[in-house]
Amino acid sequence: MFKRQRNLQGWLFVSPWLVGFFVFTLYPILASLYYSFCDYRVLTPPKWVGLANYAALLTDRDYFLPSLWNTLFMLIELPLALVIGLTMALLLNHKIPGIGIFRTIYYLPSIMPVVAVAVLWLWVLNPQYGLLNAVLTPLLAPFGLQPPGWLADPKWSKPAFIMMDLWAVGGSVVIYLASLQNVPAHLYEAAEIDGAGSWHKTIHVTLPMISPVIFYNLIMGVIWTFQYFTQTFIMTQGGPQNSTLFYALYLFYNAFRDFRMGRACAMAWILFILTLIATLIVFRTSARWVYYEGERN
């Protein structure tokens, strides 16, 4: 009797979480999977159409395939953010007077609201009176060159977003910096005894010891890239000429502008599969370059 009462009390304590999980997590997941096989317009009952939504998306050369390509293009940002963030962290890891001020300056952009950052960069990247082109124009004029049109030019719109995102790389810098400060000092001392210089200590000591943090930032960067949405929704709405129509933005348009909720659910599951494949590839390759302290070969 006492054991049954204890079990009942346990279930009562976890019931809020269980209810929340089943109602707000598991049910929406299963419902979206069902709706992805339906012609569902929100205001009308869903109609089963099988794989029609997936077939329509995979043959859509006007919007879906360009949105997928635009999103994959943004993966270029990952190695750039990795190198820049790690380089900045290595520089900020030195103990010199005033280093805390520099760390704060580099970190500030990453804590600004995304909407505020987007509005700020709309002005910076404006091709006519923006700050960036105001600086580039006198520098390029002697060579007979004109600065890019940035967000107004389909060729430069995605690089403009990459540049804007790299400006806020300070969030990853803080993570790298914390990991750098946890590298055991005796490893550097042993390397110095063996005659290793700064470059060799970085390659053979620092990078292996912080490789789990690099791996974490890489995984989070992949997931974040596939879900790229807020900046383009505020700044370009997918233009010009759909050059910034990223996957998540097109999914949003299907669901809440065109009310094609079934097709939006199909896009969500394709996005899940693509993200899963990308992260699995990173996980499978991590055994070659990620070192966990205490493991043995």
Image (cartoon, rainbow, N blue to C red):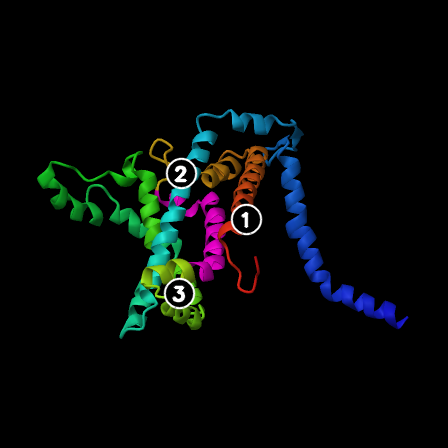
Residue 170 screen position, x and y as percent: 36, 59
In the image, residue 80 above or below residue 157: below
Residue 60, position in %: x, y? 49, 26
- Disc 3 from disc 1: Cα separation: 23 Å
Q: Main secondary structure of the magenta part?
A: helix
Please tell me which residue is depicted at 64% across the width and 38% down the height of the picture.
33
What secondary structure is found at the residue carrying circle 1? Answer: helix
Report which quarter residue 44 is drawn in. top right
Disc 3 packing (10 Å; few <14; some 14–19; many ≥20): many
Dot 3 or dot 2, earlier in sequence: 2
Name the quadrant containing residue 151. Answer: top left
Query: What amino acid is found at the position of numbered circle 2 in the picture?
Result: Phe
Callout 3 secondary element: helix
Identity of the amino acid at label 3? Leu
> Which residue position is annotated with label 1?
283
In this picture, which residue range is highlighted in magenta?
Answer: 207-235
Compare residues 252 and 257 and report the one nearer the observer. Answer: 252
Q: Position of residue 204 (x, y in %)?
A: 41, 59
* 227 magenta-colored: yes
Q: Secondary structure at mark 2?
A: helix
| Residue that sits furthest to the left in the current view | 142
Marker disc for residue 177 = 3
- Tag 2 near tag 1, CB within 8 Å: no
The residue sitting at 64% across, 31% down in the picture is 38
- Is 53 left, or right, of 121 in this rendering? right
Q: Residue at x 67, y 56 (%)?
A: 20
The crowd level at tag 2 (other Cα within 10 Å; few <14, some 14-19, many 20+) is: some
Q: Mark number for residue 73?
A: 2
